[in-house]
Amino acid sequence: MSIAERLIHIQQQEGLSASKFADLLGIQRSGLSHIYSGRNKPSIDFLQKLSLHYPQYRLEWILNGDEPIMKNQNKGELSTQRDLFDEIGDNVARSEEIAPYSSKKDKEIIDNSVQTESNSVIDKQTKSIREILYIYTDGTFEILKPVNNK
C-alpha cells in the first residue's frame, strides 16, 4: 500500500470527501489530488497538518505502512474499517434526499454553452496566419508568410 493509498484510507475512515479532507487540513484541493495521483509526494508541512488533525493515526504507518494503524491499537487487532454494506446503506438513505429534476438548471447550462460557442466562433474569425515554418530532415528550413499579412 502506497502513502497515497494510506491517505485515501484515512480520508475514507473519517467519512470525508477529498475536497472536505483538503479543506480540513488547510491545503489546496489540487495539492491533495496531485498526492493521490502520485504526481507529488506529501510534504513535511502536509504530514504535520495531518498529524495535528488526526493524532490517532501513527506516522510510522502513514509513512512506511508499519502496523498498527492507530496509536492505541495492538498489532494483532484489526482496524475499525467501515463495512462495504454500511456504505450501501448510507447511499440508499441519501438517494431519497436527492432533489427532483430541474429543467431550469439545464436551460441555464445550455444557454451558457451556446454563448460560449458563439464567443469562440468570434475569436476564431479574428485570427490569421502569421507564418508557416517547414523544417526538413536535412537540417534546412523554410518560412512561408502570407501575402496579405501586414
Image: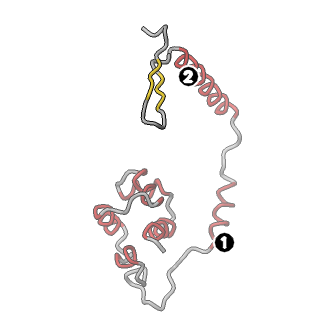
* Residue 141 versus residue 48 in the image, above or below: above
Q: Is 68 placed left or right of 111 in the picture?
A: left
* Residue 74 versus residue 50 in the image, above or below: below
Q: Nearer the viewer, residue 140 or 53?
A: 140
Q: Using the image, tell me which numbered label, if any, was put on residue 120.
A: 2
Q: Is 85 placed left or right of 11 in the picture?
A: right
Foreground tag (1 vs 2): 2
In which quadrant of the rendered view does residue 66 lie? bottom left
Q: Nearer the viewer, residue 35 or 53?
A: 35
N-terminal-most mark, 1 or 2: 1
Q: Using the image, tell me which numbered label, if any, was put on residue 58.
A: none
Q: Amino acid at mark 1?
A: Phe
Q: Which residue sits furthest bottom?
A: 76
In which quadrant of the rendered view does residue 53 lie? bottom left
User: Circle 2: is it few (<14), some (14-19), or many (20+) Cα within 10 Å?
Assistant: few
Q: Amino acid at mark 2?
A: Ser
> What is the total number of numbered labels drawn onto the structure image?
2
* Residue 16 versus residue 9 in the image, above or below: above
Q: Residue at x 46, y 36 (%)?
A: 138
Q: Residue at x 45, y 55 (%)?
A: 33
**Placement of the C terminus among the 4 image quadrants:** top left
Q: Position of residue 98 (x, y in %)?
A: 66, 49
Name the residue beneath numbered marker 1.
Answer: 85
